[in-house]
């Protein structure tokens, strides 16, 4: 199986068997009459802007490709960001005055889970979003539900006394969610009847 992990959204297609076409950058000096009704000529400092991205091409057996590309994509997207600053202090003085590292997690999450959001909303209120980023039946091991103990993982924020489940947007209890329902061309409802998914 062939996978391409990118660090940004890109257009791609396989127009012929055995070929892959990926649009890295599109720059036009004149409107090409393909929908945008204007030239695509972004520039800065007198030069045309050029997008440079990263690509990770993965060729693996179908049975293990989901594990490889899901973890690779997560590592590419969530890679550490190096930040530097000039200071007049020595390292010893600086490290004595400031905390150099901190993590809210006091334990490791399972490989198929990711702490998407840890947002302090008030003195004792947090929005915590944990995502399971493997699809159903995508991997023999990691597609299954995972159970974690939030208190043992997030000891650093204090004692958890209450939890409220919310939708992914973090603004609505699941019982109040009203999904759109429409009928498809083959007169089937858009609403899934199998709730095990």
Image (cartoon, rainbow, N blue to C red):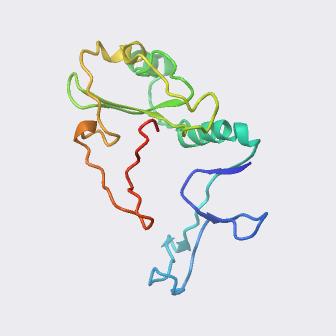
For the residue pair 47 and 59, the one nearer the viewer reads as: 59
Q: Relative to 63, is 111 above or below? A: above
Extreme residue toward the front, this view: 187
For the residue pair 87 and 126, the one nearer the viewer reads as: 126
Instruction: Answer left or right for 119 relative to 41.
Output: left
| Residue 59 percent location from the top left of the image | 76, 46
Task: Kindly indicate the quadrant of the structure image that contains residue 26.
Answer: bottom right
Q: Can residue 68 be seen?
A: yes
Residue at the spot x=46%, y=22% of the render? 101
Extreme residue toward the right, this view: 18
Residue at the spot x=55%, y=68% of the render? 49
Q: Can residue 173 be seen?
A: no
| Residue 108 percent location from the top left of the image | 52, 19
Residue at the spot x=64%, y=52% of the render? 54
Task: Kindly indicate the quadrant of the structure image that contains residue 171.
Answer: top left
Instruction: Answer left or right for 24 relative to 110.
Output: right
Q: Relative to 61, is 182 above or below? A: below
* Count of all numbered marks drawn on residues in the image: 0
Q: Relative to 56, is 187 above or below? A: below
| Residue 47 percent location from the top left of the image | 55, 72
């Amino acid at each position: 199986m062939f996978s391409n992990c990118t660090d940004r959204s890109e257009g791609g297609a396989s127009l012929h068997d055995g070929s892959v076409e990926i649009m890295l950058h599109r720059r036009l000096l004149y409107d090409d009459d393909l929908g945008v009704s204007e030239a695509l000529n972004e520039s800065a400092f007198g030069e045309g802007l050029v997008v440079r991205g990263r690509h990770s091409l993965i060729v693996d057996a179908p049975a293990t490709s989901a594990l490889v590309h899901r973890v690779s994509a997560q590592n590419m997207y969530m890679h550490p960001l190096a930040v530097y600053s000039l200071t007049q202090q020595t390292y010893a003085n600086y490290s004595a005055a400031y905390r150099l590292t901190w993590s809210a997690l006091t334990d490791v999450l399972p490989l198929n889970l990711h702490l998407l959001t840890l947002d302090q909303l008030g003195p004792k209120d947090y929005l915590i979003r944990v995502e399971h980023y493997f699809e159903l039946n995508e991997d023999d091991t990691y597609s299954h539900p995972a159970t974690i103990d939030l208190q043992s993982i997030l000891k650093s924020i204090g004692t958890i006394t209450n939890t409220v489940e919310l939708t992914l947007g973090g603004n609505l209890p699941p019982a109040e969610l009203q999904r759109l329902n429409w009928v498809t061309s083959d007169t089937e409802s858009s609403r899934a009847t199998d709730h095990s998914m």
